Amino acid sequence: MDTLITNATIVTGEAAQPIIEDGAILVRDDRIAAVGDTATLLAAHPQAARHDGRGKAVLPGLINSHTHTVLTILRATVEDMEGNAVYGYMVPITLSMTAEERRAMVNLGALEAIRSGTTTLVESNRHVPDYAGYLVPTGLRLVFSELCTDALINQVRRGEYTYDKDRGKEYLDRATQLIEELHGAENGRVEVQVASHATDNCSPWMLEKLLTLAHKHGLRRNVHLAQSPLELQQVKRLCGGTPAEYLKQNDWLDDELIGAHWTWCTEADIDLLAEHGVHMAHCPANSSRRGPHRANVARIRDAGVNIVLGTDNMTEDMFQALKIGLIVHRGSYEGGGIEPQPEEMLATATRNGARALGREDDLGSIAVGKKADLTLLKLGPNLRPVINLVSAIVHYGHPGNVDGVMVNGEFLMRDGKVLAMEEDQVMADAESAARAVWTRLMDQSPDIAPPRGAVWLQR
């Protein structure tokens, strides 16, 4: 049956008609069949089931272009710690988890994502086949990748880099399993990419194997790029250059690559990446936990790079990413300013994300023929008065405004209620799993400091 969303303010993301007041959207099966004013669409489709959007805004579904839902287990820990969070905590804790514990934490991340208005998660981690199938029933649009490496990554926190082909083959086997089991599943709602965890923990042999795998299956790729000084030092030893130059030497730079972070990219690196059409996955909220993210976003924007938005670790809150992103992007220019404008910032979480996925034709905006992936927001007191709605959403929106989430024409959340998951059970399972994992990690790794404030955790 057709569904007609009526009486809403529609933020289309389309240049020709960006805002439609008292608008309506006709959803037929998994696609948008019509967009226009409410009176016209009601008259044309009187038999359609109605969803009243009065007092609400409808946006293109938010695309979280870089996240690791397993790492909700680190929430309110590494943000306040010294040292290298990636190798000091993220790697050890994910490697110490059981399959059931991974599933508990990714379900928590998915629940938060839905409540934060997200329709697409680009999710990567280690041991993804353990849990990927458990995220499919949430109804979210999912893009998975196994973060592959041939370095013995649990040694890196001690400054040791050892590359092992047998270890690399284990990751390649899991990546292949993920592709064979899930790429194209649920009529294309689930996709898979090929991922190098990072430039420092993949040897040239590993990068070649991953590139071959991607080409064999026609898949896009992603990589953590220039995210730490430790990475810069190791890549210098590997190739005599920067992480961007290392990827160029190994034929990895093209418009099918999304590189996350770019924290330590030089101006020459940025120009090189822009020349090859590489997309930047920016996670400004997470990257600013210890102060504003130092990536040269001004140079990146001015070079014409397609910037997409992600949450990275510990949170799935895309509204936080939008507002901190706006501040970081503006602050990257000397003296600050008013660029980018909110409309451009919102595009990083919608149109730009669709472009990076190769899905511009059917995702990223509200237009006839596109997938019915929609986010509905209550226009509560924080978004009033409605003067410039997009500006209000970017500056002041929060997950509490999210009233509905639709993917492929199906509501995952409707009238403030999540339909796809049992919320209380998800939270209870995650709480139990997190305590078990942290306790085990402290027992097994005496060199890792316990998180502050965890009164239940005794070493």
Image (cartoon, helix red, strand yellow):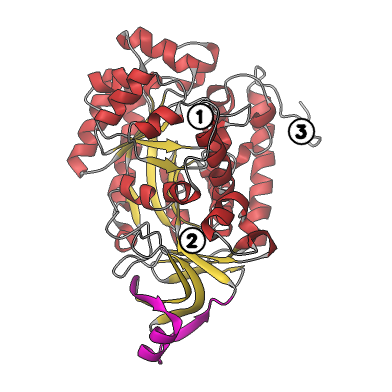
Residue named by callout 1: 332
Say if 10 sits above or below 54 in the image.
above
The secondary structure type at the circle numbered 1 is loop
Mark 2 touching mark 3, by CB under 8 A? no
The secondary structure type at the circle numbered 2 is helix
Closer mark to the observer between disc 2 and disc 1: 1
Residue named by callout 2: 138
| Nearest to N terminus: mark 3 or mark 1 | 1
Closer mark to the observer between disc 3 and disc 1: 1
Q: CA distance from mark 2 to mark 3?
A: 32 Å
| Nearest to N terminus: mark 2 or mark 1 | 2
22 or 322, which is in the foreground? 22
* Residue 390 percent location from the top left of the image: 52, 57
Residue named by callout 3: 457
Residue 38 sits inside the magenta stretch: yes
Q: CA distance from mark 2 to mark 1?
A: 37 Å
Say if 234 sits above or below 267 in the image.
above
Q: Quadrant of residue 82?
A: top right
The magenta segment is 31-54
